[in-house]
Amino acid sequence: MNKGIILAEDFSFMASEDIRLYCTHALCHKGEASFCLAGHLFKMQKGDCIIFPHSELVSEIRASEDFRTTVLYLSNEFAMQNKPKNDYDVVGRLSLLRNPVLPLLPEEQKIFMEDVEHIRQRESNAGHRFYNDLMGCLIEIFQLDLYDFHARIYGEPHVSGHGAILLGKFIDMLKSGEYETHREVSYYASRLFITPKYLSEISKNISGYSANFWIGRFTIDGIIHLLSNKNISLKNIAERFHFSSMPHFCRYVQNILGVSPTKYRNSLYSK
């Protein structure tokens, strides 16, 4: 069995600590579900596909009793090993942080399920002499189809290869958790051997948002993830993110979420 692929019919794996190692793909067949990403509520219903490139940042998943879905969890490592040879991945991942819901046409829903079924049928055939290559091809096909769905909905971007590579490295640094200790554009620009102005320009040109926006987005998502665990004190969260003081931490959260960390946490447990 390929540990880079997990097939399921619910979101129970999202509660696992290992979820940060996986990207989540799901298609809703019936009912509806809701979830929170960076303090924003999203809903999915029949025919909707959701993709979480950073699954650990998703919280408050709630589903109706009649909710039915097909889920494919794909490890980030296996996905990167078999990533299609184009630059769409960078733009797609950034766009999905803004809105991870893709309303699919009936024929696209069929393609999604056909891809998953092909993966399911071959995934247990570990005796195949070229098993890893075989599964890699199937995953690449699946990802290309997802790119096609996304491009149909949001349009195909025009991205320079160099800019896409730089922005991809910037996002990878954020995903690795460096936002916990570094929230200055200058830090990431220096790591990439470019100027802060150039990093901000390529971020704006490619994603539509500034580099500061993405630093803040990852930071608040990480804070929200910790706020959802009532066993972690606000003081510990502030210290983990290297805020100079509790008032500074509270102001930061208030400015982005519109409420204090305490009020936001209380709202999670009053629902």
Image: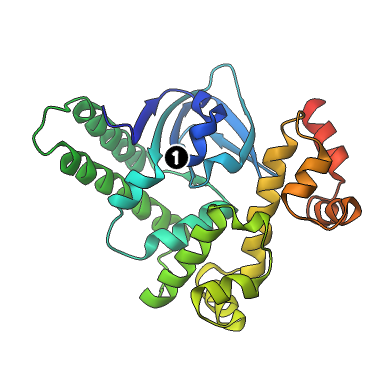
Q: Residues within 10 Å of mark 1 (few under 14, many from 20)?
A: many
Query: Is residue 262 at all visible to an observer of this figure?
Result: yes
Q: Residue at x 16, y 26 (%)?
A: 125
Q: Is residue 97 left or right of residue 235?
A: left
Q: Which image quarter is the C terminus in?
A: top right
- How far across and how far down the image is residue 23, in percent? 45, 42
Instruction: Judge by depth and name the residue closer to the eye, 25 or 221.
Output: 221
Up the image or down, 183 lies above or below 53; here it is below
- How far across and how far down the image is residue 142, in percent? 30, 44
The residue labelled by disc 1 is 22
- How far across and how far down the image is residue 227, in percent? 75, 38
Q: Is residue 144 left or right of residue 36?
A: left
Query: How many numbered marks are there?
Result: 1
Is label 1 in a helix, a strand or a loop?
strand
Q: Quadrant of residue 36?
A: top right
Query: Is residue 204 at all visible to an observer of this figure?
Result: no
Q: Residue at x 31, y 49 (%)?
A: 145
Up the image or down, 72 lies above or below 189; here it is above
Q: Is residue 34 left or right of residue 14?
A: right
Instruction: Judge by depth and name the residue closer to the eye, 101 or 56.
Output: 56
Q: Residue at x 44, y 40 (%)?
A: 22
Q: Residue at x 78, y 41 (%)?
A: 236
